[in-house]
Image (cartoon, rainbow, N blue to C red):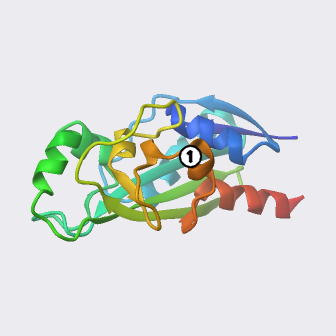
Amino acid sequence: MKEIIFVTGNEGKKKSALKHLSNVSLTYEDYGFIEPDINDIELIAREKVLYAYEKSKKPCIALDAGFYIPAFPGKSNFPGAFPKRELLDKIGIDGLLEIMKKVEDRSCYFKECLAYYDGNEVRYFYGISSGTISREIKGTDSNQKWSDLWYIFIPKYYEKTMAEMTEEERANRKGNSSALQNFSKWLESQN
């Protein structure tokens, strides 16, 4: 079984990896990596995986995700690669809902980039999940969540937030592309 280090401290990402990478022996490391201050998920994932490989000398993956709101007042595609730092920590979910109160276009999307490095070349795998921002916080907490955006993100084709969905509904969402799934398919094709 292939051994890979997943560079993350995010419990939700760990749970997702266990589902999608059952054919891999995963270990998790954080390595205290400080993300570069650049609004580019691919570059952040690349720097993180190269840093981890330097420390471990073993195949590594790093997954970075951004959250984008095209019609955010005054800042198109805010918060981008910094949903925790620029949105959740500074504005919060309640603050976001207040800012978006009078905005008609509530479309948004998550974009993921998974970088894999085994010492030869960095390979990238992408995922995207489109949806809308709800008008209020809805749903329950779970160890499956990646962030508090879970309570306000309504995936495309659905009428409830991620936090209102069952685990099965979340796992089988239509219109969702996962970087972890795409990486898993690629790994299988290499064997």
**Looking at this view, is 45 or 47 the one in front?**
45
| Residue 68 to residue 37: above or below | below
SS at mark 1 in the image: strand
Residue 42 position, x and y percent, is 47, 59
Residue 20 position, x and y percent, is 70, 48
**Would residue 91 be visible to someone looking at this image?**
no
Q: In this view, does 30 lie to the left or right of 119?
A: left
Callout 1 crowding tier (Cα within 10 Å): few <14, some 14–19, many ≥20: many
Residue bearing mark 1 = 62
Q: Which residue is drawn at 46% across and 40% down?
A: 146
| Residue 140 to residue 73: above or below | above
Q: What residue type is labelled 1?
A: Ala
> How many circles with numbers are drawn on the protein?
1
Quarter-of-image position of residue 81: bottom left
| Residue 45 to residue 175: above or below | above
Image quadrant occupied by the N terminus: top right
**Looking at this view, is 120 or 85 the one in front?**
85
Q: Which residue is drawn at 37% across and 59% down?
A: 40
Residue 107 position, x and y percent, is 30, 67
**Would residue 79 be visible to someone looking at this image?**
yes
Quarter-of-image position of residue 101: bottom left
Q: Is residue 170 left or right of residue 78?
A: right
**Looking at this view, is 149 or 169 the one in front?**
169
Q: Which residue is drawn at 78% across and 42% down?
A: 22
Q: Is residue 162 left or right of residue 22?
A: left
Q: Is residue 106 left or right of residue 144?
A: left
Image quadrant occupied by the C terminus: bottom right
Q: Residue at x 52, y 58 (%)?
A: 113
Residue 188 position, x and y percent, is 83, 58
